[in-house]
Image: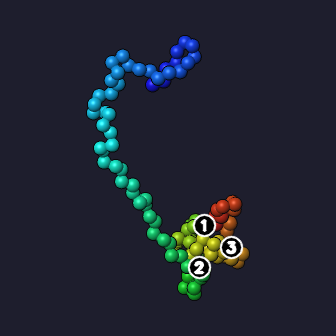
Amino acid sequence: AVVSTQSGHYGRATSKTGKDKPAKAKSGGKAKKKKWSKGKTRDKLNNAPMFDKTTYGKLYEEVPKYKLITPSIVSERLKVRGSLARFGLEELHAKGMIKLVDKHANQVIYT
């Protein structure tokens, strides 16, 4: 421990006996080293980069029936990329099949 004296000089505090720690505490480094985990790995999402006929059909048939429609929900259920889900929802909105509830910079909500 560092102790301040009255003169403002900082010096190391020493105990009167000279033995600060018991013998057990001095012998360190014998404990087992911590093994680092490799971290949690997520499964890679293999979402389609383009609509095929079946997925495009589902977009027109099933998606307008959802109670809450967001690009993330469409992406997850139809197994398509988020950008593709966004374009699909814009198309459905332009055709009047779904209604816009809220448009934010990061998230668009339809119903």
Residue 14, placed above or below residue 78: above
Q: Residue drawn at (33%, 18%), measured in percent from left and top?
A: 17
- When asked about the image quadrant of residue 93, the answer is bottom right
- The circle drawn on residue 17 is none
Residue 18, placed above or below residue 93: above
> What is the secondary structure assignment of the residue under circle 1?
loop
> What is the secondary structure assignment of the residue under circle 3?
helix
Q: Residue furthest top?
A: 6
Q: Count neighbours of disc 3 (C-alpha within 10 A) and say few if under 14, some if 14 to 19, many if 20 or more.
A: some
Colour convention of the picture = rainbow
Q: Residue drawn at (30%, 44%), measured in percent from left and top?
A: 31
Q: Residue furthest right?
A: 94
**Badge 1 vs badge 2, beta-carbon distance below 8 Å:** no
Q: Amino acid at mark 3?
A: Glu
- The circle drawn on residue 90 is 3
Reading the image, the residue beneath label 2 is: 49
Residue nearest the observer in this picture, 96 or 105: 105
Reading the image, the residue beneath label 1 is: 70
Q: Amino acid at mark 1?
A: Thr
Answer with mark 1 or mark 2, whichever residue precedes in sequence.
2
Residue nearest the observer in this picture, 111 or 90: 90
Query: Which quadrant is home to the C terminus?
Result: bottom right
Answer with mark 3 or mark 1, whichever residue precedes in sequence.
1
**Badge 3 vs badge 1, beta-carbon distance below 8 Å:** no
Q: Residue furthest left?
A: 24
Taking 61 as reference, is 91 left or right? right
Q: Count neighbours of disc 1 (C-alpha within 10 A) and say few if under 14, some if 14 to 19, many if 20 or more.
A: some
Tell me how far mark 3 sits from mark 1, CA to CA: 11 Å
Q: Count neighbours of disc 2 (C-alpha within 10 A) and say few if under 14, some if 14 to 19, many if 20 or more.
A: few
